[in-house]
Image (spheres, helix red, strand yellow):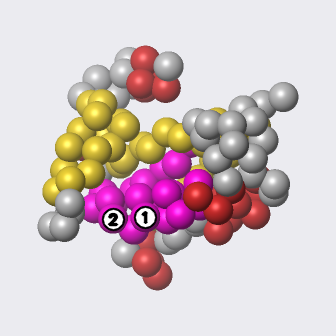
Amino acid sequence: MVYAMLLPIFPTARTEVNSDNGYSGMRADIYLEAYDILIELKCPREGLPEKELTEQMGADGFLYKADTVFFLVYDKNCIVRNPEAFAKAFRRSRQSDGKMVKAIVIQGK
């Protein structure tokens, strides 16, 4: 759905883009090459511990080589206890960290 909404605005957007970070292969959900923006979509399954989601996103944010990384988390099972603090924990700026990282958490129920 996200890809379908982005495509009219960014016609060169690609999905499931493979890249090599020098250690292992990575696959981005959506990549906007012209802007070096990577969008990683997360929909954690029921029963996934918040800590495991945090670890997955931390690894992704660190390993992706894009200049800008957005995490869109649809937390339909409300496993994230504090969405605002969770998103803030992943915020990085280009000036201090070399790339911009932002997370957006949308909860269901």
Residue 6 — which label?
A: none
* Viewer-closest of 47 and 100: 47
Q: Is residue 84 left or right of residue 30?
A: right
Q: Which residues are magenta?
A: 53-72
For marks 2 and 1, give the CA distance: 6 Å
Give yes or no for residue 94 being in the magenta stretch. no
Residue 63 — which label?
A: 2
User: What secondary structure is marked by label 2?
Assistant: helix
Asked whether the viewer can see residue 32, the reply is no
Asked whether the viewer can see residue 84, the reply is yes
Q: Quadrant of residue 40?
A: top left
Picture coordinates of residue 42, whole percent (x, y) = 54, 41
| Three-letter code, disc 2 | Leu
* Viewer-closest of 21 and 48: 48
Q: Quadrant of residue 15?
A: top left
Q: Is residue 61 above or below residue 31?
A: below
The reply to whether the C-beta atoms of the residues labelled 2 and 1 are less than 8 Å apart is yes
Image quadrant in which the C terminus is located? top right
Q: Quadrant of residue 86?
A: bottom right
Picture coordinates of residue 17, whole percent (x, y) = 24, 39
Give yes or no for residue 56 being in the magenta stretch. yes
Q: Which residue is mark 1?
A: 59
| Residue for point 58% across, 66% down | 91
| Three-letter code, disc 1 | Ala
| Residue for point 69% across, 43% down | 47
| Residue for point 72% across, 32% down | 76
Q: Residues within 10 Å of mark 1 (few under 14, many from 20)?
A: few
Q: Is residue 13 left or right of residue 62?
A: left
User: What secondary structure is marked by label 1?
Assistant: helix
